[in-house]
Image (cartoon, rainbow, N blue to C red):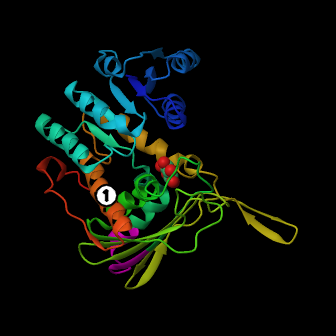
Amino acid sequence: MELRIGVIGIGAMGRDHVDRINNRVNDARVTAISDINQEEGLKYGAEIGAEFISNAEDLIASDEIDGVVITSWDPTHEEYVLEAIKNNKYVFCEKPLSVDSAGCMNIVNAEVEKGERLVQVGFMRRFDRGYEDIKKELDKGQLGEPLLLHCTHRNAEVDSKYDTPMAVENTAVHEVDALRWLLQEDFVQAEVILPKKQTTNTHANLHDPQFMLLQTESGVCIDIEVFVNCKFGYDINCKVVCENGEIGLTNPTYYSIKTENKDYKRVPSDWKERFIEAYDKEFQLWVEGIKQQRITGPSAWDGYMASVTTTALSLARDTGEKTTINFEEMPNLYKQEQFV
Ligand code: ISE
């Protein structure tokens, strides 16, 4: 049976997901879309053969929709996810699950009350081959205990709307989730160091680059460089230093070009290119989850934990102080599937 998927928000990310659902994911098709821009929505709906439903709540409630994808403006996520839970609909929500931790907790509580997982959050890095392989190696234990992690998250450039807080909330949030999943433990302390020297390629509202530090419950120390105007491409690195060795991501390019005394490897241009396979896999897992009525991908609890951690990082940046990360106790609903 082909699942009927409704997508709310048809900006760049929404369209990217429509394309993967219709062309690369098995057993699902986008049959309805919704967007605040009616003209664009009608035009795009006609292009992809999907009904345009102007009111997102009507799309969520429709009997002709089996699953909802939320790629709308961040502040609308919480409201639409809660509406989906109310309507017993499976829902895939792009990060952030909500703009704050209290909002994420509202979703956790609504799901716990239903007694069933309906929500998957768009933390795609868990599905990336590189991160998966690192996790397998760490789980084997031959490298010994992880001690330190060095990560970089570099974007070629960002637009003028991207400001200092977004380096945490929009960008480092991916490391926050992926590293928590890799290490299978939570973070307890956050710190952000803003180097005095910034790139001349930034603008007045964006401190770039930034240096973030996290510590886990067991004492693993992590540094994350976020540099979103690095100019040369989308460059993601993660090195885990263990007792008996080191393991890290490589640039996932399958060829190099030698010419004019140089040996070139391509650097991806953005996250859509770098993580294309991971995005496809996360959606395939979501579709399988709906079919089997058992969602196992990143959960509302993971969305909440990412939010408490990014909130602490933001506070640490604003105060210049090390900040303790506090969180609620994990409800039983999430214990079984934790860190899948
Ligand atoms: C963007 O929203 C993403 O999700 C990308 O993965 C990240 O690299 C980028 O910095 C964000 O702005």
Where does the magenta region start and end?
137-149
Q: Is residue 300 above or below residue 175?
A: above
Q: Going 32% across and 79% down the picture, which residue do you hit?
A: 145
Look at the image and tell me in which quarter the N terminus lies. Answer: top left
For this view, does 294 lie left or right of residue 195? left
Q: Position of residue 46 (x, y in %)?
A: 56, 14
Name the image quarter holding residue 121: top left
Circle 1 sits on which residue?
A: 311
* Residue found farthest to the bottom: 244
Is 258 inside the magenta-drawn segment?
no
Mark 1 beta carbon near ligand 1 (under 8 Å) = no
Q: Going 20% across and 63% down the picture, which residue do you hit?
A: 326
Figure label count: 1
Q: Going 34% across and 15% down the picture, which residue do you hit?
A: 64
Q: Going 45% across and 29% down the picture, which residue do you hit?
A: 9
Q: In this view, does 58 lie above or below 330?
A: above
For this view, does 227 lie left or right of residue 33? right
